[in-house]
Image (cartoon, grey):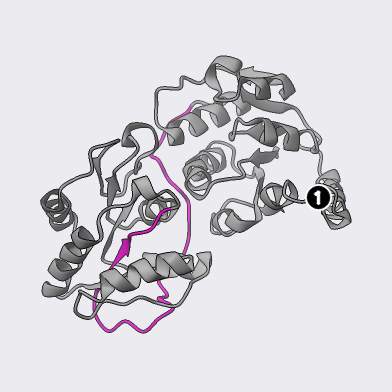
Amino acid sequence: MPRILFVKTSSLGDVIHHCPAVSDVARALPGARIDWMVEEAFAGIPALHANVRRVIPVAVRRWRGMPWNPAVWSEIGALRRALSVEAYDAVIDTQGLVKSALLCLLASGARHGMNRASLREPLAARFYDVQHAVPREQHAVERNRQLAAAALGYALGGECDYGLRAESSPPVPLSAPYAVLLTMTSRTDKLWPEERWREIGRTLAGRGIRPVLPWGSESERARCERIGAGIAHAVVPRRLSLKELAGLIRGARGAAGVDTGLTHLCAALGVATVGIFCASEPALTGLHGSTPVRNLGGAGAPPATASVLSALEDLL
């Protein structure tokens, strides 16, 4: 019964893109004990995966902001102790960064990662016991799947299954079918114009589908409220946890969103989703899998409103 530790710490979209690799391992190696080291802010995602035995949170983002704080070293010590109770057959770093490679050193077991030619940060390869060639010009989901298969010696096959299990449990009262509109992202160049979102929302509302606009920060709430003010029956909920967002998304008729982790979560949870790309190319990190999805736009080429409406109509 192999014991496996995956290291994929951030960001939200990257963590979601790793889920199919976990599903592959569980399918190829029945009984495998799979643990996952992840940034604390995103620990809710592996917790939703049916085949993850133990979620091991880390706080690298927080730690590096206060390296001399005794509390930080106390937390790192607690992490080392948590990892010391397990002797892993394989420690697999699908993040492929120096910071994730260093985290691998804290665990006991053969460390696997991509080789220098396959990595964005080639220096990370120096910390692996076994290096694997994984072609770069393919979707991130498939790169994760290929690395896991190479590290554990099974033939990659089967559909892309994210393995996430979330109950349909909207955390706010919704009396009609609804669609989730994810208008926010951390990069302003990835935003889609507010008026276009209002047109999408009005069209959905006219068809009896209530638009719901979640948010994560005060500036995002203000944006969602501006958009929602121009749409009849739009809902801007309170701030939701990742688990609550998963429940909201799971109950939706469909979703549309910019290039942000929550848009990938929609697709991973089996919800028909339109991805709107304004400053990045979807070929390598777009919506991916067996769920009905549509990727529109690209770097410097945001999609027209009519294209998004047409795609939503096809999917819904």
x, y percent for residue 87 = 81, 39
Q: Is residue 176 magenta?
A: yes
Image side of residue 315 versus residue 34, left or right = left
Residue at image x 33%, y 40%? 279
Residue at image x 80%, y 47%? 67
Which image quarter holds the C terminus?
Answer: bottom left
x, y percent for residue 24 = 51, 39
Rendered view: 157 above or below 186 = above
Residue at image x 47%, y 47%? 13
Q: Which of the 4 quarters of the picture holds residue 28?
A: top right
Q: Amino acid at mark 1?
A: Leu
Image side of residue 210 versus residue 189, left or right = left
The residue wearing badge 1 is 79
Taking the image as drawn, is residue 215 in sight? no
Rendered view: 305 above or below 116 = below
Q: Is residue 214 magenta?
A: no
Dominant secondary structure, magenta: loop
Highlighted range, magenta: 156-185
Rendered view: 197 above or below 113 = below
* Secondary-structure class at tag 1: helix
Residue at image x 70%, y 31%? 101
Which image quarter holds the N terminus?
Answer: top right
